[in-house]
Amino acid sequence: MQQIKKKNIRHEADLTFRESMSIVVGHGVGAGILAAPYVASQNSLISLFLASIVAYCINYLLHLFVAELSLRNDGAQIITCLRQTVFSGKMGGIVVWVAFVILGLSEFVKGAGFITGAAAALSEWFGIPDRLAMIIYYLLAAAVVFRGMKFVGLCEQASVYTMIIVIGVLGIAVVLHPKAGFTDKPIDMSFGSFIALYSMLSFSLSSVMSVPQVVKGLEGDVKKIRGAIASGTGINACLILLITVITLYGTGGVVTEDGAMVDLARNLGGWVKVVGLLFTLLAVSTSFWACTLNLRDIIAEKLPISITHCFALATVPCLILAITGMSDFVGLTRLSGMSTVIAGLAIIPAFLKLQNDSSESPICGKFFSLPYGLLIAVFAVIAAIGAAVPL
């Protein structure tokens, strides 16, 4: 098997294991925590746990494959990996540019969703106009990304640990609140609502675009990469499950598309409102940082411009989309799941090429086989169908 030399990894900054793990958590936790409860409110708790387990397993496999692909291409983002591994020639270049545009738009929409979610929390908290809240949040959050990958990793780590503490406090407060309780109304479940829930959870656990950051930050250390992926995805899943159950209990199952914490704050008020809105800002910030940092790197690998210009192209369109009226947070997050779908479908040709080069995989191990690749692709299609199911 071809050995990967650490000196070949495209290296911006060293990341510790915890920082790398936090970047994996951060990429999807904002969308999952704020939007998953709305979709879950139309399903049973058993469906929620089942969909979470399946989504974790599929995303873990997907992340391993993406990490393998990135490692063999010196830490490159998935677009560059596909160009170097699968899509060669003029036609391949066209395919890669199409994927670049789709992924870029997906990340822009995702970033706009996080700005919208944060603005809803700030507006609820301080009573300021939505657009002013968007601008204030953008200036503060984008400043972190401007400082680069290391600073993002530090902020992600601090935010994840703070969220764990806050969610414990929030859970106790909700359980003790006299107005809280699960709904006793029967839920009109359907297969469509279940795959919509799986789609949302799959998207929320997806850190496809952040995996190359982990590969670079850990300098190709295979053991640490696997650990960061497994633990980061696992923490993300646990946070999403906890906040979903807390929200369903705290709101009596009445969840709107404004974002879970906003609904919880409106229903319970008091200091629960303050804690809930703080949690919202932490969650969307971790995701906004990871999302726009990834987009910055994708642009940098594709366009011959400075990193400062890449930063501007990665963040400013998100603000513009948010300000121009894209205010449906849940709708935005469902729409922006295309990055997961593209990565899932691209796994098959990339896998065949990698297996042709070597039958062994330092990262995937026993999962480096065609059946697992096909499994990822099938569930990517299911996730795409689920994202289109009307709720």
Image (tube, rainbow, N blue to C red):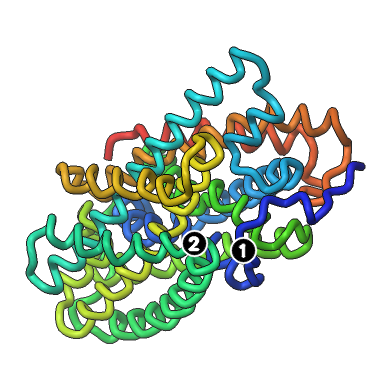
Q: Residue 248 at what x, y percent from top left?
A: 30, 65
Quadrant of res 350: top right
Write down the residue under mark 2: 148
Marks 2 and 1, how far apart at CA: 9 Å
User: Which mark sits nearer the N-terminus, 2 or 1?
Assistant: 1
- Pointer 2 with pointer 1, Cβ within 8 A: yes
Which disc is residue 243 wearing? none
Q: Residue 389 at what x, y percent from top left?
A: 34, 34
Q: Residues within 10 Å of mark 1 (few under 14, many from 20)?
A: some
Q: Nearer the viewer, residue 352 or 330?
A: 352
| Residue 47 in view in this figure | no
Locate the N terminus and report the quarter of the image it occupies: top right
Q: Residues within 10 Å of mark 2 (few under 14, many from 20)?
A: some
Left or right: 352 with respect to 205?
right
Left or right: 369 with respect to 56?
right
Residue found at x 76% / y 27%? 352
Amino acid type at mark 1: Ala
Write down the residue under mark 1: 13
Residue found at x 25% / y 72%? 277
Amino acid type at mark 2: Gly
